[in-house]
Image: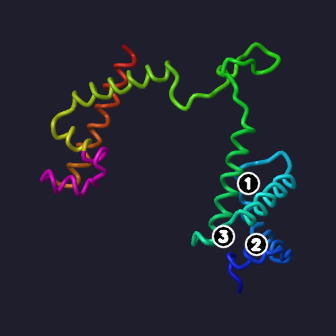
């Protein structure tokens, strides 16, 4: 099998078959780049990519000890990244979003919580902290080990030095106490 460097050397010498072979071998890369950097027309994209490859064949300097495949690969990627940047329109978020009076910024969905959701989240966390403070020390420890450290009730029972059934009852009582405390905070 002939190397890319040899193909490039032959193509530079005027061998059209070598040029066509290089273009054919780079087709999968061109298709992959078309998926990453969409063009208006797929055939135009392939044609531009082939032009970049032909230019890379002409400009490749084998004396530098580099491989043609890496050189051509980078030329293509940088070309398409540059073209993609040029095609991206710069929009102002205060631009009109169409016929109606909405601006683009009004239509962007937030990844975070709304101010109302953030407020209720803070209130809920405060209520949970207050409810946790109403538990006995053993109940706090069991809840902490079970929910925050992911330990099983068997492990918790062994660590605290109580029976498994006692650990289950303490956990259940603690949860009931938390529910009661949180319900009363919401009502008040």
Q: Count residues near mark 3 (Cα–Cα under 10 Å), then give few for <14, some for 14-19, many for 20+.
A: many
- Name the disc covering residue 25, or none: 2
Q: What stretch is highlighted in magenta?
A: 145-162
Query: Helix, strand or loop at disc 1?
Result: helix
Query: Helix, strand or loop at disc 3?
Result: helix
Main SS of residues in magenta:
helix
The residue lying toward the viewer, choosing from 50 and 110, is: 50
State the quadrant of the N terminus: bottom right
Membership of 161 in magenta stretch: yes
The residue lying toward the viewer, choosing from 180 and 6, is: 6
Q: Disc 2 vs disc 1: which is toward the camera?
A: 2
State the quadrant of the C terminus: top left
The residue lying toward the viewer, choosing from 102 and 59, is: 59
Task: Return the residue at label 1.
Answer: 35
Q: Which of marks 3 and 2 is nearer the N terminus?
A: 2
Q: Position of residue 144 (x, y in %)?
A: 25, 42
Q: Position of residue 4 (x, y in %)?
A: 69, 76
Q: Position of residue 185 (x, y in %)?
A: 34, 19
The residue lying at 64 percent from left, 72 percent from top is: 62
Give the alpha-carbon distance from disc 3 to disc 1, as whole Å. 23 Å
Q: In the rendered image, which quarter is residue 154 located in?
A: bottom left
The residue lying at 38 percent from left, 25 percent from top is: 124
| Picture layout, residue 179 above or below residue 147 | above
Q: Which of marks 3 and 1 is nearer the N terminus?
A: 1
Task: Return the residue at label 3.
Answer: 68
Q: Disc 3 vs disc 1: which is toward the camera?
A: 3
Membership of 52 in magenta stretch: no
């Amino acid at each position: 099998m002939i190397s890319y460097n040899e193909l490039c050397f032959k193509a530079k010498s005027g061998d059209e078959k070598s040029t066509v072979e290089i273009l054919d071998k780079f087709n999968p890369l061109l298709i992959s780049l078309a998926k990453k950097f969409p063009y208006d027309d797929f055939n135009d994209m392939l044609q531009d990519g082939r032009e970049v490859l032909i230019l890379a064949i002409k400009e490749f300097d084998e004396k530098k000890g580099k491989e043609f495949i890496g050189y051509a690969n980078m030329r293509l990627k940088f070309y398409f990244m540059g073209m993609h940047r040029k095609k991206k329109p710069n929009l102002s978020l205060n631009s009109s979003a169409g016929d109606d009076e909405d601006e683009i910024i009004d239509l962007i969905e937030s990844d975070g919580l709304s101010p109302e959701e953030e407020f209720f989240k803070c209130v809920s966390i405060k209520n949970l902290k207050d409810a946790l403070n109403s538990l006995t020390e053993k109940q706090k420890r069991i809840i902490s080990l079970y929910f925050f450290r992911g330990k099983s009730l068997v492990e918790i029972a062994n660590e605290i030095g109580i029976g498994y059934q006692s650990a289950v009852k303490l956990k259940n009582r603690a949860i009931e106490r938390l529910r009661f405390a949180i319900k009363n905070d919401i009502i008040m």
